[in-house]
Amino acid sequence: MKDTFTSDVPARLDRLPFGRFHWLVIAALGITWILDGLEVTLVGALAPAIQGPDGLNLTATQIGLTGSAYILGAVLGAVFFGRLTDRFGRKRLFTITVAVYLLATVATGFAWDFWSFVLFRFLTGAGIGGAGAAGSSWEALAGSAGAGEGAGFPADRAATSSRPLAIMARRNAAGPRVANRAAASGSSSPP
């Protein structure tokens, strides 16, 4: 016979106030996701101008390769910065990766040839991939009971209501775990 165990932790978490700190976490992650989507859209919309003689005079193949460089940068950035996140803290690495993204995006506008464009697109991808990795772990911790100072959160702000984070969590790799935990809590409305 299987032993069952009942906990009132999810119900207690749902009763906690959802404060300014939690809204800042959600805003930071939301902005990162918007930038990620906007990034791909902008390059696609600007491809004809980039290909033209007044731009970088790139071929369609070269434009495609720059898109691949962005995706490769996002994957490697998530792995590299995700590992550093565990070592140096989520808030610090989230800030650093957003700065990498910002600087690489600006540098992309000053690309002088195909290879500089590829390099800057790769770095832009690395910044957004790293921000996603740092943000995902940050978000998972924000919704975890018992996450504390070692996780990058002050102990009094570590626990939070699970429903709003579950809504945001469905977008990323950590999403299913966080969303399932929130759904299992039985809460049907935000606090």
Image (cartoon, rainbow, N blue to C red):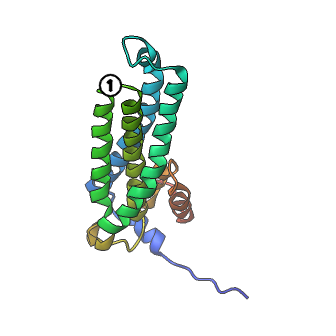
Question: Does residue 163 appear to the left or right of 150 in the view shown?
Answer: right
Total marks shown come to: 1
Residue for badge 1: 112
Name the amino acid, label 1.
Answer: Trp
Q: For the residue carrying disc 1, how many other residues have a C-alpha within 10 Å: few (<14), some (14-19), or many (20+)? A: few
Residue 161 placement: quadrant: bottom left
Question: Looking at the figure, which quarter contains the N terminus?
Answer: bottom right
The residue lying toward the viewer, choosing from 91 and 139, is 91
The quadrant where residue 46 appears:
top left
Which residue does the image show at 33% across and 57% down from the upper left? 18
Name which residue lies at 54% across and 21% down: 60
Q: Is mark 1 on a helix, strand or loop?
A: loop
Q: Which residue is drawn at 49% across and 26% down?
A: 63
Left or right: where does residue 61 sit relative to residue 109? Answer: right
Of residues 143 and 163, the one nearer the viewer is 143
Residue 164 horizontal/vertical position (percent): 43, 53
Residue 159 appears in the picture as rendered:
no
Residue nearest the viewer, comparing 111 with 89: 111
| Residue 162 position in % (x across, y down) | 44, 60
- Image height of 105 relative to 173, above or below: above
The residue lying at 41 percent from left, 40 percent from top is: 122
Residue 43 picture location, percent across and down = 44, 26
